């Protein structure tokens, strides 16, 4: 017979062995699970916000900052060409105010004309959906793919356009993001952002007392959210390429000129869009211009590298600074650009926040 003490020792050893085997099996299960299911990625802040909803989101939102933006190059007869941009900004701070900017450049003569206005409240007609802004002699409206612009006095000139989009809307997003139409700018906030890169435009330009029929392709942007544009500067490119594809690139920097990010969106001729990651593109300055009016230095020549080639970008008209001192109290450069390299093209460049870099190195 086995002594009682021996039985006790054997039983205890068996219990210990079973506990050890259970613990080892549990560890093995955890290891197997970790190989099958990697740790989940952190949830995007943008996922907490309502998704982009069009055409309802064409309308004003009451957010801290919002703008509707058009830029393009218009062709007339006999090699006549005009570049323009018009915009409406709605700012909700201690008081709500609406700002309108317009610029028209005669690319044949080099003459440039600008106008701006500011009014309290929201000079808009809310009926019918979309947006419909009205000021003295100025109107800007749109519902879905059909828009209309009328600016009766841009430095003594006028612009009237009907615009129609036949492509899908481009909802910008960061590479790897699951929230199209939303961009996270970190400490500066979150922005909704979509574009209609190729709106077919037809209408007229009245310049130097003469009316000119014009046609062209216009880039439209709508952006809004609880974000602080004063904390960042940017260089923004909207490019139409000859094969029918489009390219939007922007480079953000802080008020000391330190880079924050470079990213963008590429759009195929069929309207299919893909975000570009920061490691897929580089921007290098190649030419600078200093405004004789303000002393602000802007980068007007750039070399852009993307996965499918290299582009050389240069301004068509250097003196395209917009002094918005009487409306939004800022300076920016906005004008047409020519593109050559992997493909030819043209588009628009916007440089904002450069006035804070007078004593600092520009991007």
Image (tube, rainbow, N blue to C red):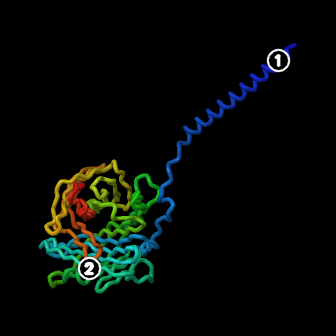
In the rendered view, tell whether residue 328 sits above or below residue 29: below
Q: Which mark is residue 5?
A: 1
Mark nearer the viewer, 2 or 1: 1
In the rendered view, tell whether residue 290 sits above or below residue 307: below
In the rendered view, tell whether residue 171 sits above or below residue 213: above
Q: Say which residue appears at 30% left-offset and 73% top-offset.
A: 328
Q: Mark 1 falls on what kind of element?
A: helix
Q: Residues within 10 Å of mark 1 (few under 14, many from 20)?
A: few
Q: Say which residue appears at 36% left-offset and 51% top-offset.
A: 277
Q: What percent of the width, then of the height, locates residue 250?
A: 31, 58
Specify the farthest residue to the top.
1
Q: In the displayed structure, does residue 117 sit left or right of residue 49?
A: left
Q: Say which residue appears at 19% left-offset and 80% top-offset.
A: 155
Instruction: Locate the C terminus and report the quarter of the image it occupies.
Output: bottom left
Q: What percent of the width, then of the height, locates residue 279?
A: 34, 48
Q: Which mark is residue 268?
A: none
Q: Say which residue appears at 29% left-offset and 63% top-offset.
A: 238
Q: What percent of the width, then of the height, locates residue 17?
A: 71, 25
Mark pair 2, 1: CA separation: 105 Å
Residue 101, can we see it?
Answer: yes
Q: What percent of the width, then of the height, locates residue 196?
A: 35, 68
Instruction: Locate the N terminus and report the quarter of the image it occupies.
Output: top right
Q: In the displayed structure, does residue 39 sit left or right of residue 175?
A: right
Q: Nearer the viewer, residue 307 or 137?
A: 137
Q: Nearer the viewer, residue 221 or 163?
A: 221
Residue 245, can we see it?
Answer: no
Q: Nearer the viewer, residue 163 or 65?
A: 65
Specify the farthest residue to the left.
109
The residue that label 2 is drawn on is 203
Q: In the displayed structure, does residue 76 sit left or right of residue 252?
A: left
Q: Mark 2 falls on what kind of element?
A: strand
């Amino acid at each position: 017979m086995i002594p009682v003490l021996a039985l006790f020792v054997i039983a205890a050893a068996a219990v210990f062995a079973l506990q050890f085997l259970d613990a080892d099996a549990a560890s093995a299960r955890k290891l197997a699970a970790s190989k099958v299911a990697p740790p989940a990625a952190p949830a995007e802040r943008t996922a907490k916000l309502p998704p982009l909803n069009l055409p309802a989101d064409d309308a004003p939102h009451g957010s801290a900052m919002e703008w509707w933006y058009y830029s393009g190059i218009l062709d007339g007869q006999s090699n006549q060409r005009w570049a323009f941009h018009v915009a409406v900004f709605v700012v909700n701070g201690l008081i709500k105010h609406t700002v309108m900017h317009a610029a028209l450049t005669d690319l044949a003569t080099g003459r440039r004309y600008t106008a701006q206005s500011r009014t309290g409240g929201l000079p808009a007609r809310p009926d019918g959906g979309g947006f419909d802004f009205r000021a003295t002699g100025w109107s800007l409206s749109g519902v879905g793919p059909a828009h209309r612009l009328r600016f009766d006095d841009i430095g003594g000139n006028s612009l009237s356009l009907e615009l129609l989009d036949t492509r899908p809307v481009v909802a910008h997003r960061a590479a790897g993001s699951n929230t199209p139409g939303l961009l996270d700018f970190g400490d500066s906030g979150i922005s909704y952002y979509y574009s209609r890169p190729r709106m077919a435009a037809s209408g007229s330009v009245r310049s130097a007392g003469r009316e000119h029929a014009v046609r062209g392709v216009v880039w439209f942007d709508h952006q809004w959210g609880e974000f602080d544009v004063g904390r960042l500067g940017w260089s923004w490119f909207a490019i139409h390429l000859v094969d029918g594809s489009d390219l939007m690139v922007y480079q953000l920097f802080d008020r000391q000129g330190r880079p924050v990010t470079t990213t963008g969106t590429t759009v195929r001729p069929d309207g299919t869009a893909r975000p570009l990651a920061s490691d897929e593109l580089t921007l290098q300055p190649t030419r600078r211009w200093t405004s004789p009016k303000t002393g602000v230095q802007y980068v007007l020549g750039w070399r852009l590298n993307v996965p499918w080639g290299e582009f050389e970008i240069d301004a068509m008209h250097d003196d395209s600074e917009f002094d918005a001192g009487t409306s939004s109290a800022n300076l920016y450069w906005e004008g047409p650009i020519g593109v050559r390299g992997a493909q030819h093209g043209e588009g628009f460049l916007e440089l904002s926040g450069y006035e804070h870099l007078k004593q600092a190195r520009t991007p």
